[in-house]
């Protein structure tokens, strides 16, 4: 049976699009729900074009623990019989109890070569530190931020005239290849690290 996947977004949803296209092509899993925490997320329109059920649940609190928000998410996940969650540019930290209720069943893509540059503003920090190499990482989500088991990693060079925006675009291009590839391996039960 192919796993039912929910993709969580907050913005443009370009990773969501690449995941959906890959699942449709390869059939290793099924995109069953797109969930956003922002009504303005343009990725919601993209999900509608795919005819994938989409929901927007906005938290009442700007940050921190919001039990009503998470309870509503859990209800939707149950409603759509979701088995696996892919965070794809979802800019809201989920509580420990939420993460613990989905053990080994939440994946995330982070725009750096973890364990380096956890958290926000990764490209800015990469530039400031004069790194020659950066990239992106797909990992399991655990209560500790950006620290779960690494499943896939892709590198990109940092070039002499790079800006935050040029690096962001170069990394994003790789994200669109790495995330589907890693999700496929994960769904097929293969534990080898995916590298690019
Ligand atoms: C990606 O760079 C992802 O790594 C980060 O947020 C961005 C989301 O982009 N967490 P998109 O919404 O998939 O276009």
Image (spheres, grey):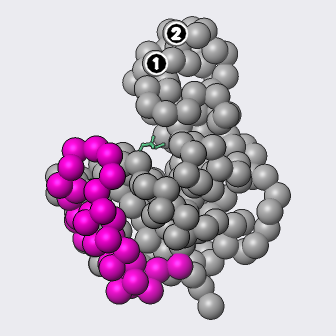
**Which span is picked out in magenta?**
55-83
* 102 horizontally vs 114: left or right: left
Hey, which residue is sitting farthest bottom in the picture?
Answer: 1
Q: Is residue 191 above or below residue 151?
A: below
Q: Which numbered tag is attached to residue 184?
A: none
Q: Closest to the observer: 63 or 85?
A: 63
Packing grade of label 1 (10 A; few <14, some 14-19, many >=20) is some
Residue 139 drawn at (x, y percent): 63, 51
Q: Quadrant of residue 57?
A: bottom left
Q: Quadrant of the C terminus?
A: top right
Residue 148 drawn at (x, y percent): 65, 50
Check disc 1 and report the residue beneath it. Answer: 124
Check disc 2 and report the residue beneath it. Answer: 128
Residue 145 drawn at (x, y percent): 54, 43
Q: Indicate yes or no whether the magenta region holds residue 57.
A: yes
Residue 69 drawn at (x, y percent): 27, 63
Packing grade of label 2 (10 A; few <14, some 14-19, many >=20) is few
Do the numbered discs 2 and 1 sit on residues whose CB atoms are within 8 Å? yes
Q: Quadrant of residue 141?
A: bottom right
Hey, which residue is sitting farthest right in the picture?
Answer: 192
Q: Quadrant of ligand 1?
A: top left
Q: Closest to the observer: 131 or 69?
A: 69
Mark 2 element type: helix
């Amino acid at each position: 049976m192919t796993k039912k996947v929910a993709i969580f977004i907050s913005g443009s949803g370009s990773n969501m699009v690449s995941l959906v296209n890959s699942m449709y092509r390869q059939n290793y899993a099924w995109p069953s729900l797109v969930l956003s925490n922002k009504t303005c997320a343009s990725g919601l329109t993209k999900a509608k074009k795919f005819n994938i059920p989409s929901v927007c649940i906005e938290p009442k609190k700007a940050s921190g623990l919001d039990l009503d928000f998470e309870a509503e998410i859990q209800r939707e996940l149950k409603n759509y019989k979701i088995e696996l969650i892919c965070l794809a540019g979802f800019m809201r930290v989920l509580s420990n109890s939420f993460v613990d209720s989905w053990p080994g069943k939440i994946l995330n893509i982070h725009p750096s070569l973890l364990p380096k540059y956890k958290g926000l503003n990764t490209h800015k920090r990469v530039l400031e530190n004069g790194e020659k190499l950066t990239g992106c990482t797909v990992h399991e989500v655990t209560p500790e931020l950006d620290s779960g088991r690494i499943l896939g990693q892709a590198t990109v060079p940092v070039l002499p005239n790079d800006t935050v925006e040029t690096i962001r675009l170069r990394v994003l291009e790789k994200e669109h290849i790495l995330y589907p590839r890693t999700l496929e391996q994960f769904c097929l039960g293969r534990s080898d690290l995916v590298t690019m």
